[in-house]
Amino acid sequence: MSPLLKLSNAALGALPKGVAGPGYDRAELTPGIVHIGLGNFHRAHQAVYLDDLMGQGRDHDWALLGAGVRAPDARMRSALKAQDCLSTVIERGPEGRFARVVGAMADFLPVDPGNAPLIAALSDPAIRIVSLTVTEGGYFVDPATGRFDPDHPEIVADGHNPDQPATAFGAIVAALAARHAAGHTPFTVMSCDNLPGNGGVTRDAVVGLASLSDPQLSDWIAGNVAFPNAMVDRITPATGPREREMAASFGLDDPVPVTCEPFRQWVLEDSFTAGRPEFEAAGVTMTSDVHDYERMKIRILNGGHAVIAYAGALLGHEFAHQAMADPRIAGLLDRVERAEILPHVRPVPEFTPEEYLTLILSRFSNPEIEDTTRRLCLDGSNRQPKFILPSVADGLASGAPVEGLALVSALWCRYCAGHFEDGRAIEPNDPNWAQLTETAQRAKSAPAAWLELREIYGDLAEAPRFSAAFAGWLRQIWAVGTAATIGSYLGD
C-alpha cells in the first residue's frame, strides 16, 4: 500500500487519483474575507463556494483568512497551518464518495486572548467581508426575548475593555473603530449561522456592544455597515476516527477532514458595504427575500432534526439514518412536519413546503452521511427556541395543533434527565447541562418545572394547550417509555 500523502502546497501536484485539487494557483490569492469560526460547516460550505469561484478564474482577491476566539480555534489553526491551510472535503451520497482538496484559505491568524492579530487584520482595508460561523449560541441572544442581551457577562466585559476584547463581536467593534478613525470604508459583517434573521441578529450584537463603550461609534456602525441576511444549508457531521479513515481511503493523511452530504444551498441578501465575490456564479441564490427560505429551512430541516434527534437517541439509534429507518420515528417526523410545521411555512421559487419536506426526508435517510443523533441533540437550550418553539407559537396563534411539538419538547426533557431508558448515562451535551439535568429530574414528578425555564420557553407555560400536552406526554414517557409514547401519538 502506498504511503498516505500529507497535504501541502508542494503536494498538490501529486494528489492521489480520484482526488480533485484547487483549479488555480494559490500563490495568486490575496485575502479579502476574514472568517471567524473554522468549523466543519464553514469548510464544507462557504470555503467550497469560494473554491469553485476561484477555479473559474474569479475572485482571487477574495481568499479567506481563518480566525477564531476560542481554544478549539487554536487547535484547528495548528492542524490547518501544518497543511498550508488546505482542507479535505469528502462528499458522501448514495451514488458514492467524492473527495476534493479545498484551497480557498490563504492563512489562519494567531488565536490570541486579546484578539490583537484579529483586530489588526480586520483593520486592513483589503479585508472587505467578515464572516462568521460561531454557532447559534454565540450571538448573545436572550432565548426568551429573541433579542441581544447586553447584560451577558462576556458582553459586559468587552464593553469595559473595548481595546482587548475576548469575543468575536468585540474584535469586530474594535476594528470598525480603527477603520472609522482612519477614514477607511467599513467591512460587511456576514453571518453564516443557522439563526432566524441572522443578519439582524448580528447587527444587534455589534451595534449593541459598541453602544456600551462608544455610542457615537455605535451610531456610525448602524448607519454604514451592511449585515446581510443569509440561509445556509449542508449536513456536515463532526470529525472523528471514521472520517480520518475515510480520508486515508483516498490516500490522504489529514487529521481534520470534513465529510458532508452532496446537497448544499446558500441564499444570501445582496447587501454589501465594500463589494463581494461573484457568489451567484457558484450557485448562491442572491435575493432580497431571504426570510421565506430561512423559515423553510430552519422550521422543516432544523426543526425536523430536533424531532428525530431525541427520539432516536432514546431509542438507541446512533445515526440519523438509522432513526429514519425506524417506522416509529419516521411516522413521528412525518406527522409533526405535515400537521404542525408545514402549515406555517410559505413556498419559495424552488420548492413548496411539501417538496422541501420530501427532499429533507431523503437527506436525513442518506446512509452514507452517518450523522450522529448525539450531534443533533447538542445544545438544545439554544436550538429549541429557534427551531421548534416558533412553530409552537404559530400553532397557538392560529389554532393549529401543537401536540406533536409538545411531544418533541417532552422527549428533549427526558433526554436531559441524563440517562437512557436502560440506565446508561448520557454524557453532557449542552452548555447548560447541569441546570437542564436538575430541572428535568424535577420535572419527572412536576412537569411544569421544565416549562418554567423562562429563558427558553418564555410564557409558553401559560399556554394551556401546549403545557397540558407537554405534561401529558412527559408523564407517559416516564411511565411506559419512548416507543410506546410515540405509538400513542401515532394512534397505534
Image (tube, rainbow, N blue to C red):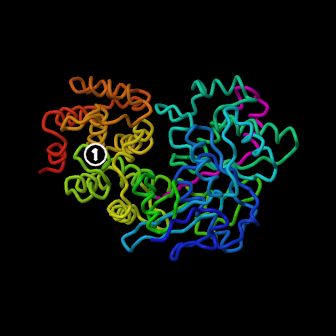
* Residue 128 part of the magenta-drawn span: no
Say which quarter of the image contains residue 110: top right
How crowded pointer 1 is (Cα within 10 Å; few <14, some 14-19, many 20+) is rated as many
From the viewer's perspective, is residue 451 above or below residue 48? above
Name the spot of residue 350 as percent of width and height, x first.
48, 68
Residues in magenta, as a range: 210-234
Residue at image position (36%, 28%) is 436
- Mark 1 highlights which residue? 313
Residue at image position (67%, 50%) is 108
On the rendered structure, is 325 left or right of 35? Answer: left
* Residue 224 part of the magenta-drawn span: yes
On the rendered structure, is 123 left or right of 2? Answer: right
Secondary structure under badge 1? Answer: helix
Name the spot of residue 363 as percent of width and height, x first.
37, 63
Going by the numbered disc 1, the residue's amino acid type is Ala
State how many labels appear.
1
Front-most of residues 310 and 458: 310
Quick one: quadrant of the N terminus? Answer: bottom left
On the rendered structure, is 320 left or right of 87? Answer: left
Name the spot of residue 432 as percent of width and height, x first.
42, 30
Front-most of residues 361 and 452: 361
In the image as oriented, which residue stretches furthest toward the bottom?
17
In the image as oriented, which residue stretches furthest toward the right?
182
Name the spot of residue 491 as percent of width and height, x first.
14, 50
On the rendered structure, is 409 left or right of 273? Answer: left
Say which quarter of the image contains residue 448: top left
From the viewer's perspective, is residue 474 above or below residue 32? above
From the viewer's perspective, is residue 38 above or below residue 14? above
Front-most of residues 405 and 186: 186
